[in-house]
Amino acid sequence: MAAAAAAALTLPGWIFAGGDARPKIGFAIEAMKGERWQTDLEAFQARAKAMGADVVSADAGGDDDKQFAQVKEMIKGGINVLVLLPHDSAKAGRIVDAAKAAKVKVISYDRLALNSDVDLYVSFDRNQIGAMQAQYLVERAPKGNYVLIGGSPGDEGARVIHDSQMKVLKPYVDRGDVKIVADGYIQDWVASDAYLFMLKALDAANGNVAGVIAANDALAGGAIQALREHGLAGKTLVSGQDADLASVICIAQGVQSMTVYKPVTQEAERTAAEAVRLARGEKIETTRTINNKKIDVPTILLQPVVVARGNIKETVVKDGFQTLVSINRDLPEGERIH
């Protein structure tokens, strides 16, 4: 099976990688939309394979019941460790419970599964992400109307990001320097819904918006589309998260102010390594915990990085996360990164 081990075999809703080596790790992904999770999966598979592990992963397409069913199939298939990227943090408890009942260790990946006995949580510091987004914008626009576009209400991490944004903005709001004219969450982080939300906010504020704190790059893209239609792209500051290619291009163009880059290959590789250690019964070393409303979960938090036009080459390009060729492909000479 050596040849088969070198490549992933794709079946409807399923991706298999690895060979006959043990241990066996399941990676349950909430939805393989956009470029982010594909990058994570590829890095995870490569690291796990290098450590002699077998990987089975599934794409739930944003369906909580489907994810639950997929994980139960993984458990029947004999996984030793489940790495879970939950669609809805609050509904993930039953998935964790099913795994634990079968004596399968569980790592909550990027989003923390609530009210459950998770063995390990690996992510980036969301408090830091939200603070970075708000601080970057408010330092450049300390007065004016602001719009906050949050992530999916079922994602506990989206709420953490929002709350940390508000901690930064509160002194400005209390002084009357900043007025929040619109503040809402977008189900499943859908860019088109962020676009509609931004259109309504612009109408309510008569087009007078100094800053848009968008929780991720998809939402930022929706907001920028609305700003373009009002002739405000490049005039209104916009934050993001994930360093998606489209947003890095927007940063180069000057229509998005910043994004928070999370070196996701580091996250995926670290999680794969910890999953193998858990499967082998080795001790996991962590320095902090985060409470998930049931237990204090041992936690590994990696450091995010602000990306703006001045440091694109030194961050996402240097790490190989994006390439200058891709960024510059459709940009005029004056906007290209050299």
Image (spheres, helix red, strand yellow):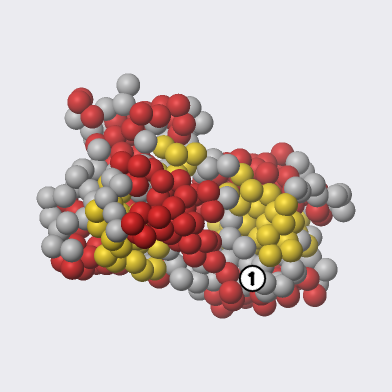
**170 or 40: nearer the viewer:** 170
Q: Is residue 293 above or below residue 245?
A: below
Residue drawn at point x = 46 percent, y = 71 percent: 153
Q: Is residue 19 left or right of residue 256?
A: right
Q: Secondary structure at mark 1?
A: loop
Instruction: Locate residue 248, reporting x and y percent.
Output: 35, 39
Quick one: 52 or 320, which is closer to the camera?
320
Q: Name the quadrant containing residue 327.
A: top left
Along the line of sight, the residue nearer the viewer: 39 or 337: 337
Res 258 seen here: yes
At x 48%, y 61%, the residue is 163
- Rendered image quadrant of residue 43: top right
Q: Which residue is mark 1?
A: 114
Against 322, is 298 above or below?
below
Residue under the image location 29 percent in, 66 percent down: 182
Taking depth in this image into account, of 60 and 267 the one nearest to the observer is 267
Note whether residue 217 is visible: no
**Residue 275: image x %, image y %?**
74, 52
Q: Could you say where residue 39 lies in the image, as x and y percent from the top left? A: 52, 46
- From the image, which quarter does the C terminus lie in? top left
**At which x and y percent is residue 233?**
19, 47
Q: Is residue 325 above or below residue 188?
A: above
* Residue type at the position of mark 1: Leu
